[in-house]
Structures are given as structure tokens and as C-alpha cells.
Amino acid sequence: MTMATPPMPPVPGGFRPAGRRGSRAGVVLLAAAGAAVLAVVLATALSGLGGDENRAGAGASGAAAPAKSPKASPADYEGTWTGNVREPDGGLYSIRVDYTGGKPGDRVASVNYPSLECGGRWVLTMDTGHSVRIREEITEETSPLNCLDEVDIVLTPSGDGRLRYEVEGAGDSATLRRSK
């Protein structure tokens, strides 16, 4: 059987032994350290908001702000596109798209994934002026395990005649090249 150590009696003059509870000086020191850290963080953040002309377009970190993609026209999407889509695990599959264009709600393209042995149609769901969102509907497939029946895809013209392809929520992406 273990016996608990009885508490120490108070010492005249208000002295308290140091231990896990600490002392008032420790609390004051901790508060001062927290205030100093907060001051450094705020000073760093606020210095990035100043009107320094040499840092135009830069955030608090000094890094350039991401460039907004240029305004796209329907012609930026139309045509036959090919490429290899990279999956997050590093796998690749081929794609061929025949994009004819249209307005939201219209079938705007047919798509074929030769290496996955499936294909279908693309329906335009949104045009932001800088990119389009497509609803892909797989209508033909040799193996039902190769392709998802429906996914959302974002296409963004890169400004150099290529098209950025991204499957939302899956991480698959590609740079497509116009072949015709």
C-alpha cells in the first residue's frame, strides 16, 4: 500500500514551492512570450499589406499572385484533342475528344478513352469565360470497371493552343493537344 505525501504547510512570507502549478512570474513570462509571438506574426502579415511598389502582385510571402487564365472563346475548345491523362498514383490512360461546342445543357463533345476501352459524351454545365465545366457521361464500355459512369471535368485553355483537363474530385489531369 502506498501512502500519499501530505501537503507542505504554508511558509511565512508567502513563499510557494515551485512545481507543476508554477508561479505568478511564470504566468507573466508566458503571457509576455505569447504577446511577443503575436506581435511578430502581425508585423509580418501587415508588412505585406503596405504599398511597396517593388512587390506589386505579391502577397505577404513575397510570392507572385497566381495568374488568372486569359478569357477564353468557344474556338479555344473546338476541335479534336488528344493526350495522356495522369492519375494520382502515376498511372496513365489515353484520351481523344471531338469538341463541337454549344451552350450550357448541350452535348458539346464525344470522348473516347482507347486504353480504357470506354467512351461517351460531354455535356456543358458551366462556362466561366476562363474555363468550362463538363459533365461526362460514359455510354460505351467494354469493362464496367474501367470508367466511372459520370464525372465532372474542368477544361481550361492554356493560352498556347493546349487545353488543361482535370477530373474534379479524382485528381486525374492532362494537357491536351489539338490534333486537327
Image: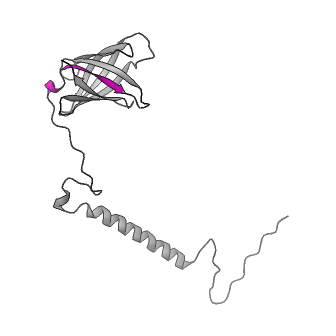
Q: Nearer the viewer, residue 39 or 141?
A: 141
Q: In which quarter of the image is residue 97?
A: top left
* Farthest right residue in view: 1
Image quarter hosting the C terminus: top left
Residue at 49% across / 76% down in the picture? 28
Q: Give the residue drawn at x 21%, y 43%.
A: 67
Q: How many marks?
A: 0
**Residue 128, placed above or below residue 19:** above
- Locate residue 114 relative to residue 133 in the image: left or right: right
| Residue at x-position 53% and y-position 76% | 26
Here the colouring is one colour
Which residues make up the magenta segment? 61-85
Q: Position of residue 125 (x, y in %)?
A: 25, 25
Residue 106, picture quadrant: top left
Asked if the magenta segment contains residue 78, the reply would be yes
Task: Look at the magenta stretch and give its main secondary structure.
Answer: loop
Q: In this view, does 18 lie to the left or right of 131?
A: right
The N terminus lies in which quarter of the figure?
Answer: bottom right
Residue drawn at the location 36% of the way across and 64% of the way down: 41
Is residue 74 depicted above or below 68 in this figure?
Answer: above
Q: Residue furthest bottom?
A: 13
Q: Is 153 included in the stretch rendered in magenta?
A: no
The x, y position of residue 154, in whole percent, is 28, 29
Find residue 123 and report its image quarter.
top left
x and y percentages locating residue 126 in the rendered image: 23, 28
